[in-house]
Image (cartoon, grey):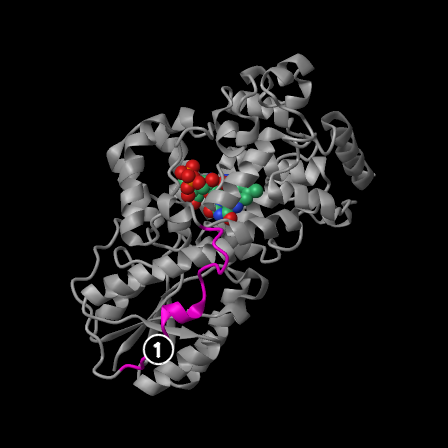
Amino acid sequence: APVILWFRQDLRLADNPALRAATKTGSVLPVFVLDDAAAGAWAPGGAARWWLHHSLATLAADVRTHGARLLLLRGSAETLIPALAAETGARSVQAGRLYEPWARRRDQRVAEALDALGGKLVLHTSSLLTEPHRVRSGSGAPYAVFTPFARAVMALGEPEAPLPPPRRMAMPAKAPAGERLEDWGLLPRRDWAGEFPGRWQPGEAGAAARLRDFLQCVPRYDTDRDLPAREGTSRLSPHLHWGEISPRQVWHAVRDATKGQSAETFLKELLWREFSHHLLWHRPEMPEAPLRAGFRNFAWAPDARHRRAWERGATGYPIVDAGMRQLWRTGWMHNRVRMIVASFLVKHLLQPWQQGAAWFWDTLVDANLANNSQNWQWVAGCGSDAAPYFRVFNPVLQGRKFDPGGAYVRTFVPEIAALPDTHIHSPWEAPDTVLAEVGFRLGRDYPKPIVDHAAARLRALDAFAALRA
Ligand code: FAD
């Protein structure tokens, strides 16, 4: 009987434990199921769908060169996977484990349905260095703070060496036809993703190339990673999300290529990724509800106009607007700027962090439920081990510190490019004579700030004080 290999967020052939298990015995039937209904609000957003389309196209081609065919199915996996097993006589379904609450519930039901047929669902550690349930504190409780969590993961030892890709995959003699990727409509109808192809190469080969390029940059990661104008970070996040590369492949490549503080700093980021998944596993309410219960009654001030200005990059704060436009144009935003724009939304504008998270979900090519929710809660001060709410970023000072020459802002907010460096992060402070010299008018060429920093900061602190009282 064939073995079903169910691809989910491990769209690769190398270092794929589910694939290794599936090819051990005989013929293998690789399948991907687009199951939006089960994911509900957390079905892949627009940018992630663009990515998924191209990633599946490359995976299908890679599978073909290995002698098999990727079966594409759309609908409820809970029904489709057991039906496929019944139709083909497959007894086992091998897959990488998922950590999203909806996926866990679904996998449970798939396992039960297969069990009733005399089959089984076997889940492998494919997307993480270690399973969230393996890391427990001395008291047996899950970790709520990053540093001891990271120490505990490190104490488990180096991750195992990555597995090589299979040489060949034998298909069963008879396999259903499946659907055509082109019929899934994953690509945007209105082409807002025009810049994506020049910036991203979804798929396993693209991930490997990205990693190879980044290995040259690792020695400078410590200093460059906070400067959004530089390509100082790996940009592996979408590849990691879809599992086109595994974290242990990244881990070992970085370890082998470099030693020293920069490599350590980078590897720590991979542990933040683990920590997010650890939290999501143990606190499945994380995408929707604040982990600190005290924040449930926070007095947000929902305002559609403010939210819209933030989404479009029209707040009048250049570093915020540059970040939001980078996100829209490229499907990605630099981590430092993600922190600044998120803080601006939840503190300066007092908009609920869930709305920011939803916008990111739709626009990020690396949208990942664990990382996105964990980081939004971190910025909003309501997460586990979060930044304290009362620490309100000043967007002007953040801009001056991390984009000192204004190169990043000039790239994404070209209408202010002619302003001198001294005013590039605060155009409203520029004297009229300076503005006139470059023919620039605030309010016409670029918005005036939608809120005043000092007043907004006080309003945020008041809201926080009211909560504490
Ligand atoms: P690098 O600096 O090269 O880091 C390497 C890898 O480590 C990343 O690819 C990522 O997998 C992981 N990593 C880095 N920083 C973090 C972090 N703070 N938390 C968890 N993992 C991390 N990351 C996502 O992958 N998906 C998201 O949906 C997401 N949403 C975010 C929302 C907010 C408000 C903030 C502040 C951060 C968010 N991040 C998210 C984390 C981080 O910004 C991105 O992982 C990072 O910018 C990706 O770029 P990179 O691959 O070049 O990172």
List x then y, in percent, for residue 179.
37, 75
Q: Is residue 167 above or below residue 134?
A: below
Q: Please tell me which residue is depicted at 60% across the width and 54% down the height of the picture.
A: 287
The residue carrying mark 1 is 178
Is-magenta flag for residue 282? no
List x then y, in percent, for residue 141.
55, 51
Q: Is residue 359 above or below residue 8?
A: above
Q: Amino acid at mark 1?
A: Gly
331 sits left or right of 399 in the view: left
Mark 1: few, some, or many residues within 10 Å (few <14, many ≥20)? some
264 sits left or right of 252 in the view: right
- The front one of 249 and 45 is 45
Majority secondary structure in the magenta region: loop
The secondary element bearing badge 1 is classed as loop
Which quadrant of the rendered structure holds the C terminus? Answer: top right
**Which portion, as a residue range, is magenta?**
175-193
List x then y, in percent, for residue 224.
41, 26
- The front one of 305 and 335 is 305
